[in-house]
Every structure is written in C-alpha cells, then in structure tokens.
Amino acid sequence: MNDLTAQVRDAIQNSNNIVFFGGAGVSTESGIPDFRSADGLYNMKYKYPPETIVSHSFFIQNTSEFYRFYREKMLHPDAMPNKAHLALTELERQGKLRAVVTQNVDGLHHKAGSVKVLELHGSRSRYYCMRCGEKYPIDVVIDAEDIPLCKCGGTIRPDVVLFEESLDQSVIEESVSFISNAEVLIVGGTSLNVYPAAGLIQYYKGNMLILINKTETPFDRQAKIVIHDSIGETLTAAVFGE
Ligand code: ZN
C-alpha cells in the first residue's frame, strides 16, 4: 500500500461519518461505458448523438427509437458490482459510511448490498407507467420487443432523469444534508466538471476531502488527499488493507 492510500485508510479508520460521492468512473470498472461513448465514435449506428436520444423530448417524440438505443447500449443487465461497490458496502456494514451519493443509474450499489444510496439521476432498475404510475422491474423492458406498455395501455418509462428533465428535489436535499454533515467526504470516479457534481461538493464543510479519480479535477487543490488511480483498487486497499 502506498503512502496516500495509507492516509485514506487512516481517515477511514478514524471516522464513523463518511459519505461517498461517485461518478461514471465507478461504473466503468464494471464494464459499463459512459453512455456518451457508448455508440462509438467510429461506428455510429444511430442517426442522433446519445445526448439527443437520451432527452425528454426525444423520448416523447421517438419512443421506439429511444428504446432501441436504450436496450442495446444502456441496459447492461449482466453487469456486476466491482471492488469499489463492495468496499463501500463493507464500510456501511461497519457503521462508518453514512451514504452513497451517485450520478450513476445502473443500480450496482444496491446490487452490491449498499442500503443508503442516493441516486441523483434515478435508476435503470426501475420503471413506471406514465399514465397510471404502476411500477415495473427491468424485465418489462428486456421482454418487450418495442415500446414496453402497461396493462392500462400507457407507455412505461425508465425512472431515470433524462436530459431536459430536472433532478428529484428530495434526493438533492438529502444528498446536501449528508454531504454538509460529513466528517470525511470521498469523491471517486468523477472529473467533477458537470452539474450537479461540482455544486454538491461545495456543501462539504469538513477538512478531509479525498479525491480518487484517474485524471485531474478542478477540486484537486482543495482536497486533503488526491489519488489519480483506479477507484476500485484504491478503495479495496484502503478498506480491506490489502
Ligand atoms: Zn398504466
């Protein structure tokens, strides 16, 4: 274990009020690419860029095309939690980690056994009918050949925040509460360049901000510990002492 990872291990061992904030880098280690790169720059199969397809207006106007992309590029039903998810589950089990705040929608923190997970952008594991509100599991999308429809005839949509839609205010408020009261804040797998990540980090008032990301972030200079490495490897070493 290197020096910086040992410092993270110390910080973890000395606190029972840790919050983790994670981004796409946590999921890429489970083989889930950032959706922006999902269609591949050199072999694009879709007429529209991913950001356009995964927007509210596109979903409403081109629901069938949306689901074609979604099913092929975004579902990842076989993805499994990686070392980062498992280390965080263990930290929560030990009573040290208060919450995971994530920008990811793959549901892998739940799959790993984490209990307190705040999903800022919703979850690909959950679906609901836009007409009657009936809830459905992921199978409803996997099993449907085209647009998944409710018993009532309404269109079923993913419980994720699409572009042009606003985040759930109650999830934001709870995240702010955990972050502003945290003793240790570990931020991992995010370049902290986009809303709402950068804004939420500003609420942290403690003096143990730990940043773990493969590349630099605008917050590196404000952090107590900065590690440019794999989030899974680093957390495993810090939590399990390996
Ligand atoms: Zn319905």
Image (spheres, helix red, strand yellow):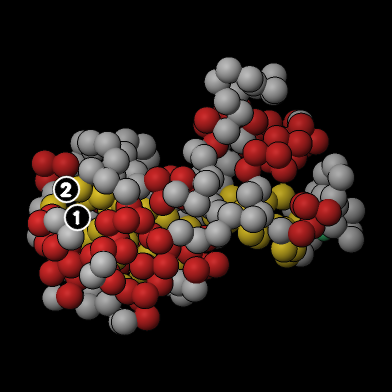
Residue at position x 69%, y 19% in the image: 47
Secondary structure at badge 1 equals: strand
* Pointer 1 residue: 210
Q: What is the total number of numbered labels drawn onto the structure image?
A: 2
* Disc 1: residue Cβ within 8 A of ligand 1's nearest atom: no
* Amino acid tagged 1: Ile
Left or right of residue 78: residue 14: left
Residue 226's disc is 2
Q: Answer yes or no: do the residues labelled 2 and 1 have beta carbons within 8 Å?
A: yes
Q: Earlier in the sequence, mark 2 or mark 1?
A: 1
State the residue at coordinates (48%, 64%): 109
Q: Is residue 88 left or right of residue 203?
A: right
Rendered position, 189 above or below 64: below
Q: Amino acid at mark 2?
A: Val
Residue occupying image coordinates x 61% and y 35%: 54
Above or below for 231 versus 19 = above
Q: Ligand 1 appears in which quadrant?
A: bottom right
**Where is the N terminus found, in terms of image quarters?**
bottom left
| Residue 140 in sight in this render | yes
Quarter of the image with the C terminus is bottom left
User: Residue 39's image quarter?
Assistant: top right
- The residue tagged with tag 2: helix, strand or loop? strand
Q: Position of residue 123 (x, y in %)?
A: 57, 56
Residue 125, by quadrant, is: bottom right
- Figure check: 63 above or below 197: above
Whether residue 131 appears in this view of the structure is no
